[in-house]
Image: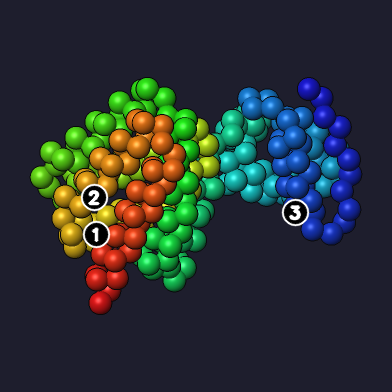
């Protein structure tokens, strides 16, 4: 599709170039896989220098919107959450965020995820949830227990049929691993395993209310364990 670009105003040319091109990408005027105009064409259409276009392209690449290859025109990338997740990872790690802050946000998030999973889980995801419960039951090493615990909660997020639950958990992944490490050390695997089995039963039964209630109990116990760690 041929998109008509208009000359930019004189101030903040790079920012304007980024905003113009990003707007065309997000609106679908430039679709995934499309090549953008040549550097010369963009310079002429936008009324800017090559350096402005080059810098704008670098910013769009850092945002995960375009791919730049030597000798080829920039190409629009399919939508993917990785760049956003990486940026938020950095933000979370640099901010003064504690494991107690984490469990406070997990409570409403994972409570709702469990309820939606009970409504929307596919037979295949239920099979995988059962497998993750068994993996936790059979795991002897702490790292294996953490992996099985994390997998159960991520599968629940997938079962919601809402991709934002998975994205948010992926952003919080480093802190979630540390939280599991502390709570499993504090109370052992049996407590987490008991909650996971009850949540799984509620999901299998399609009981959204019970799934939410048990998950909230699970998060309350997690909070108590973390408070014990800090104290």
Label 3: which secondary element? helix
Please give the name of the residue rendered at 59% of the width and 30% of the height, measured from the top-left corner. Answer: 78
Q: Nearer the viewer, residue 18 or 205?
A: 205
Judge whether residue 22 can be spotted in this image: yes
Q: Name the residue under label 2.
A: 192
Gap in Å between the C-alphas at discs 1 and 3?
46 Å
Is residue 74 found left or right of 19 in the rendered image? left
Q: Which of 157 and 211 is in front in this view?
A: 211
Q: Mark 3 points at which residue?
A: 15
Please give the name of the residue rendered at 37% of the width and 22% of the height, measured from the top-left corner. Answer: 123
- When the figure is inspected, residue 225 is found, relative to residue 46, above or below; the finding is below
Q: Residue 183 carries which label?
A: 1
Label 2: which secondary element? helix
Circle 3 or circle 2, nearest the eye = 2
Gap in Å between the C-alphas at discs 1 and 2?
9 Å
Label 1: which secondary element? helix
Q: Do the residues labelled 3 and 2 touch (CB within 8 Å)?
A: no
- When the figure is inspected, residue 4 is found, relative to residue 225, above or below; the finding is above
Q: Position of residue 206 (x, y in %)?
A: 41, 32
């Amino acid at each position: 599709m041929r998109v008509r670009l208009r000359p930019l105003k004189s101030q903040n040319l790079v920012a304007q170039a980024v905003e113009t091109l990003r707007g065309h990408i997000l609106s679908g005027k430039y679709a995934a896989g499309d090549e953008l105009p040549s550097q010369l064409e963009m310079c002429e259409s936008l009324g800017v220098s090559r350096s402005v276009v080059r810098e704008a392209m670098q910013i769009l690449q850092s945002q995960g919107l375009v791919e730049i290859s030597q000798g080829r025109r920039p190409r629009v990338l399919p939508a993917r959450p990785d760049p956003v997740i990486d940026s938020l990872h950095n933000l979370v790690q640099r901010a003064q965020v504690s494991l107690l802050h984490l469990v406070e946000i997990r409570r409403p998030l994972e409570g709702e995820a469990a309820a939606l999973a009970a409504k929307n889980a596919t037979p295949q995801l239920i099979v995988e949830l059962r497998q993750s419960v068994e993996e936790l039951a059979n795991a002897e090493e702490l790292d294996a227990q953490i992996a099985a615990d994390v997998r159960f909660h991520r599968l629940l997020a997938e079962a919601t049929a809402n991709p934002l639950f998975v994205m948010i958990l992926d952003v919080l992944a480093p802190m979630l691993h540390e939280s599991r490490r502390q709570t499993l050390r504090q109370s052992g695997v049996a407590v987490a395993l008991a909650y996971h089995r009850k949540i799984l039963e509620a999901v299998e039964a399609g009981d959204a209310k019970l799934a939410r209630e048990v998950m909230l109990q699970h998060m309350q116990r997690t909070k108590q364990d973390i408070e014990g760690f800090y104290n």
